[in-house]
Image: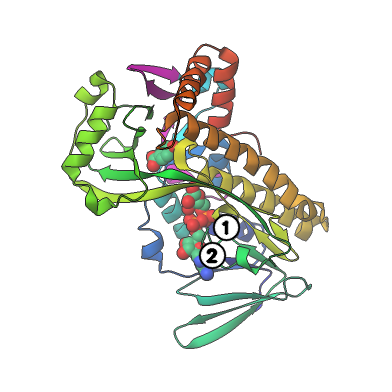
Amino acid sequence: MKVQVCIVGGGPSGLLLSQLLHLRGIETVVLEKHGREHVLSRIRAGVIEHGFAKLMREAQCGDRMDREGEIHEGVQIAHDGVIDRVDLKGLTGGSSVIVYGQTELTRDLYEARDRLGGKVIHGAADVALHDLESARPHVTYRVGDKTARIDCEYVIGADGFHGVSRKSIPAGILREYERVYPVGWLGVLSRTAPVSDELIYAKHERGFALCSLRSRVLSRYYIQVPISDTAESWSDEAFWSELTHRLPADVAAGLVTGPSIEKSVAPLRSFVAEPMRHGRLFLAGDAAHIVPPTGARGLNSAASDIYYLYHAMLDHYENHDDRGLDDYSKKALARVWKAQRFSWWMTMMLHRFPDSIEYDRKLQDSELAYLFSSEAALRSFAENYVGLPF
Ligand code: APR
Ligand code: PHB
């Protein structure tokens, strides 16, 4: 098969780029290791920046997001028995975020790909990238006992943190920066009314907690747990009881509990790979960088890569201008690192770390005291939370 752009990975990054390029007449194929149902069974975060929402609309994938997603104009932070609110809209001159599950967003992208007859190959095993430093790279893969080859002009590595693309960059060129946090998040999805209309990030001496939601009848909650804990080691009762402890009493009083529909533990990690381009390979999304979920930056960081990559590809194919491609890594990384900083900062401020000393905990208190006593600090928080400009 011959195609202009071969995209490895059928998560949100790969699908969105393929959809955007297709709409401008640039031919792509997406190689996805798993089946569609597997991809759509992963429960991930659900906060979408306004810039990302705009890109979804441009990709003709925004209808359901706009219909079913909720616009959130503020977020709340519970600490020391009080709840403070960050007025996202007021502090940013009108910006907000949309709460809409990544799973639903990915479903919308798949449906959009179907509508246009986009090529997505599921069950692509042993994907390998070849001749990336030449003008004619190719990608090989296997489905069942049949191997196949795709000749292309560009390869996009959108295959997530565990994918093959990043590993195809020679070790002498690739640099990786990483921080692993000694805590995890236990997440529960339940068919219950959310405890609050807005997200509540809670700092508590027993550990962090987050109240989030997917809709008026579907709640998503998280509690910080030791990294060694498994979802199986937490009964629903134990989860609700611990969450109740970590929320301010008046919030906890309104908590509606119910059986968990999904329960899983996610590790917290910050990670960046540089550069994000090697020859004809361009990395995007989780393949190049990971954030802890605290600031809801993960999916949004992937979206900014796609924005830069999409425009660079358009300049290449429509205007014979390669400056966007040449600058991609530098431009994408500049924004990626800002999202890294924000999610690292929020993570450090709100969790109870097993190895923290009293001094660290006093600093956490002073971070929060400063945030809610300074309009400049609040403005900075809001500007980061709704998403820095692309
Ligand atoms: N070959 C083909 N596909 C692969 C391979 C491989 N070797 N390895 C992984 N994949 C697929 C995965 O099965 C997955 O569907 O690549 C896809 C990558 O999707 P994601 O991990 O969702 O990454 P991305 O699309 O960049 O999405 C951004 O934002 O907050 C984050 O983790 C969140 O998924 C989210 C991400
Ligand atoms: C979620 O709803 O899953 C969610 C929301 C905000 C975060 C992380 C996760 O910061």
| Mark 2 touches mark 1? (CB < 8 Å) | yes
Amino acid under disc 2: Gly
Q: Residue at x 56, y 75 (%)?
A: 127
Q: Is mark 2 within 8 Å of ligand 1?
A: yes
Mark 1 — residue? 287
Q: Residue at x 24, y 20 (%)?
A: 249
- Residue 300 position within the rendered picture, expressed as x and y whole percent measured from the top left: 54, 43
Assign a secondary structure to mark 1.
helix
* 385 relative position to 278: left or right: left
Amino acid under disc 1: Ala
- Residue 297 position within the rendered picture, expressed as x and y whole percent measured from the top left: 52, 40
User: Can residue 216 be spotted in the picture?
Assistant: yes
Q: Is mark 1 within 8 Å of ligand 1?
A: yes
**Tag on residue 216?**
none
Mark 2 — residue? 163
Q: Residue at x 45, y 54 (%)?
A: 106
Marks 2 and 1, how far apart in space?
6 Å
Range shown magenta: 57-85
> Which coloring applies here?
rainbow
Residue reaching furthest to the top: 373
Reply yes or no: does residue 72 show up in magenta: yes
Rendered-image quarter of ligand 2: top left
- Residue 165 position within the rendered picture, expressed as x and y whole percent measured from the top left: 61, 66
- The answer to whether 262 is drawn above or below residue 78 in the figure is below
Reply yes or no: does residue 154 show up in magenta: no
Depth order, front residue of 44/29:
44
When asked about the image quadrant of residue 277, the answer is bottom right
Q: Residue at x 35, y 34 (%)?
A: 210
